[in-house]
Image: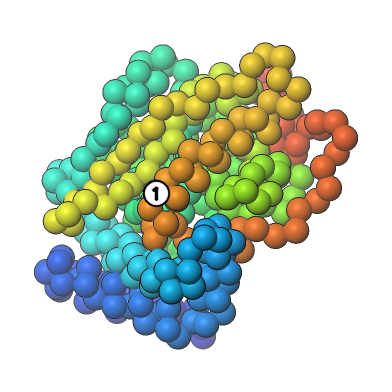
Amino acid sequence: MKNGLEYAAVMGLRMLVTALPRPVSLRVGSMLGRLFYYFHGRRRELAIENLRAAFPARTDVECRAILRSTFGHFGRHIVELLNFAEMSPSEMTHWLEVEGGERVEQALARDKGVMFYSGHFGYWELLVMGHAVFFTPIVMVARTLDNPLLERLIEKIRTRVGTQVLPRQGAIRGLLRALLDKAPVALMIDQHMQDRSAVNVEFFDRPAATTSAVAALALRTGVPVIPVFALPLPGGRYRLVYETPIEPPADDDPDPVRTYTQRCTDVLEMYVRRYPDLWLWMHRRWRPVAAEPSAPALTKVETQCETATREDRFS
């Protein structure tokens, strides 16, 4: 019953969005996001708590202003995803521009595969579609939604430009094989991880359990790792920003996975500090973390990479 009602609400919003001029639909998205701010007290208070901890020098009034803008942005993001779902590739390129595209071209020219990463920041869903129309479709990892009806809808939108979506559970094998086949892949790095694949790094001066997948796969395959973010511009346009590839750790680094993951996280934090209203503060990013081992150990991801590599070698 709940799944059906949620799906009906999204489909109703989709019909409304497609019937309205795009600027009007974006204002509707902002309004819906702000309504969510006022009516979802649990998420609002969690986000306020996260903002206060991340920006202790800001007042409560400032934090709440940022958060209202964040909720409005989230509503626009949902509406824009539905808008772009109806666009042709040429229409998408009209509303998108690229900064740092030469970094992508250089990485692709190496013919070794390339790994992109981002966070739930800016217009992250537009990254997938924009990258496909400007460069090439990618293999991406996404958490499966609890609502199977919405999951099928979102996957249909994501894959219409050729993107391949891997469920987060068991994704390492698929990512490794894609990289060994010289395909580009993409991951998100800003979600709390609760299993042995996590590595603890600093995020806003607090320890955060973070996926080690980017670091472990990059160290295993030698592919470049490029941060990418989708930023809003005036007039309903967006800029896909491809940052400088992450510098790999030195060969003698005692804990290269942690070092690599910290460097990736530092770039994301730089963008969140610069545009705090564009990050999804409503997530429980910081939770109690497990005690660190006295010496670096293989993470679950590294073990999976080892296993998959051996199986591919002998298959």
Horizontal and vertical percent position of residue 20: 14, 73
Q: Quadrant of residue 35?
A: bottom left
Task: Name above or below for residue 233 compared with residue 270.
Answer: below
- The structure residue drawn at horizontal position 30% and vertical position 41%, both measured from the top left corner, is 240
Task: Name above or below for residue 205 compared with residue 100.
Answer: below
Give the residue pinned by disc 1. Answer: 274
Q: Is residue 147 visible?
A: no
Q: Nearer the viewer, residue 210 or 168?
A: 210
- The structure residue drawn at horizontal position 35% and vertical position 26%, both measured from the top left corner, is 104
Q: Nearer the viewer, residue 288 or 196?
A: 288
- Dot 1 amino acid type: Arg
Horizontal and vertical percent position of residue 234: 17, 54
Q: Is residue 255 rendered to the left or right of residue 9?
A: right
Horizontal and vertical percent position of residue 126: 32, 50
Task: Name above or below for residue 86 compared with residue 310.
Answer: below
Q: How many marks?
A: 1
Task: Name above or below for residue 78 compared with residue 137.
Answer: below
- The structure residue drawn at horizontal position 55% and vertical position 76%, both measured from the top left corner, is 45
Under tag 1, what secondary structure? helix
Q: Is residue 66 rendered to the left or right of residue 234?
A: right
- The structure residue drawn at horizontal position 58% and vertical position 69%, both measured from the top left corner, is 49
Which image quarter holds the C terminus? top right
Q: Is residue 299 visible?
A: yes
